[in-house]
Amino acid sequence: MEVIKVRDYNEMSKKAAEYITSKVKSSTCINLGLATGGTPLGLYKNMVLDFQKNKTDYQHVTSFNLDEYVGLSEDHPNSYHYYMKENLFNYINILKSNVHLPNGKGVSLKKECDHYDKLIKGCGGIDVQVLGIGQNGHIGFNEPGTSFGTKTHVVKLTESTRQANKHFFNDMDEVPTHAITMGIQSIMNSREILLLASGAEKGVAINKLLQGDLNEQFPASILQLHPNVTVIADEQSLTSHISIQDITT
Ligand code: F6R
């Protein structure tokens, strides 16, 4: 695992955007795995700025988002479909037909999950997966205790995750109780992973990610077994570290 230590959220966002746009520019066809939440907002902002300035082409890019709430339609302002359009897709030239998120409004959610895995596989798998990390170590919506072998599935959200997401909603009652998420195995199948972290509240999680034991109670720990993970983390999220051998600054 390579750790790139940066000063703050802005620097993390710029570095992450450089990382992704250089992959996009140097490929003729690339599948990106994307995340939502607060952490990648700056990444997407910088990708949009880069598109405006440098005209980076996204017509050969296919995207797969990690997750979507169950019960929210694509045009619901709190759906991840909406988030992605508002923060990235509407401002770059990615083809609408190349954009994929799980369908949380499907009649059979199980079928939607299987379909999503097949779609990713059919497109050749994910080249670079962007991840944030939950304070309890969740990746995607894979909460502590999720089997490392899971594919895309429906999850019941924990109270702590619902609390952490409530600022996107008017009140707690509106925060969905379930989501569809790519599974841990689906994430591990990505050829490359870029995990972003910023802020002291992520300190414990980053510490466990880098130095803790492999444990299903801390889902992100599985990334220790992935051959190609880059973590871009700011100073605040790394403060609890005493020794990291492989920090690149
Ligand atoms: C988002 C996702 C989640 C977030 C995590 C961190 O698609 O899958 O795992 O990455 O909850 O969220 P933020 O970035 O808001 O701290």
Image (cartoon, rainbow, N blue to C red):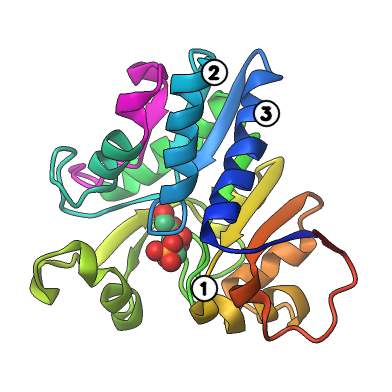
- Please give the name of the residue rendered at 48% of the width and 13% of the height, measured from the top-left corner: 59
Tell whether position 101 is magenta: yes
Q: Which mark is residue 54?
A: 2
Of the 4 image quadrants, the one containing the C terminus is bottom right
The image quadrant in which ligand 1 is located: bottom left
Q: What residue span does the magenta drawing correspond to? A: 88-108
Circle nearer the N terminus (3, 2): 3
What is the x, y in percent for residue 83?
28, 44
Residue 199: assigned label: 1
Circle 2: element type: helix
For image coordinates 76% across by 56% down, the residue present is 226
Crowdedness near tag 2: few (<14), some (14–19) or many (≥20) residues, C-alpha within 10 Å: few
The amino acid type found where label 2 is placed reads Asn
Per the rendering, the mark at residue 22 is: 3
Tell me residue 163's x, y (percent).
27, 78
Secondary structure category for the residue under label 1: loop
Vertical relation: 205 (above or below) 73: below
